[in-house]
Amino acid sequence: MKHNSTEAEPGTPVRHFALRLSPTPRGARLARLLATERLRSWGLPSERAAHVVAELAANAATHGRVRGRDFGLLLYVVAGTLRIEVTDTRDDRLPQARPADGEAESGRGLLLVDALADRWGVTRGLPPRKTVWAELDL
């Protein structure tokens, strides 16, 4: 596990936390728990962020899973904005928020992210990576 805290300009803290996790349900749960604890240690509200991390990590563990390849979680705070990034190695599977079947037990994760985050999107990285990100105004 790797975590850092740096300064962008004197008096303007830039806090960030990064780690790699196994693309499993356990890895997704651990992402939520560690993110919540990090946000608490920074003195930031964590409830909305914890739900967003949980959904993005669960998607990475379910839809972005490639055997032997971890997913990455990055949190950083700059100028009153918390940015959450989850990177996996399935750039061939881009997520889309779409209405779930009323009786389905899954499929609503990105609708929840859309409701909780102030902004979110997907960015392709170096193949085969993609990053799903969400920003929350603090």
Image (tube, rainbow, N blue to C red):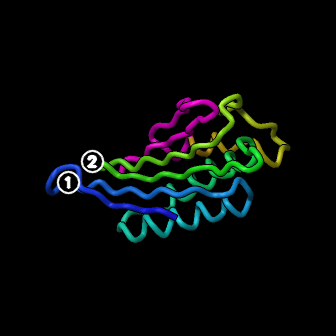
Is 86 contained in the magenta span?
no
Q: Which residues are magenta?
A: 114-138
Residue 79 disc label: 2
Question: Per the image, is 123 magenta?
Answer: yes
**Lower position in the chain sequence, tag 1 or tag 2:** 1
| Image vertical order of residue 79 relative to residue 22, above or below | above
Rounded to the nearest whole Å, what is the CA distance between mark 1 and mark 2?
Answer: 8 Å
Q: Amino acid at mark 1?
A: Thr
* Camera-nearest label, 1 or 2: 1
Q: Amino acid at mark 2?
A: Ala
Mark 1, residue position: 12
Question: Few, some or many C-alpha atoms within 10 Å of disc 2 (few <14, some 14-19, many ≥20)?
Answer: few
- At x 70%, y 42%, the residue is 64
Label tally: 2
Q: Answer few, some or many: residues within 10 Å of disc 1's Cα (few below 14, many 20 plus, some between 14 and 19).
A: few
Would residue 9 appear left or right of 96 to someone viewing this image?
A: left
| Front residue of 37 and 21 | 21
Residue plotted at (72% across, 33% down): 99
Frontmost residue, 45 versus 92? 92
Give coordinates of residue 54: x percent, y percent. 62, 55
In the image, residue 113 lies at what x, y percent?
58, 44
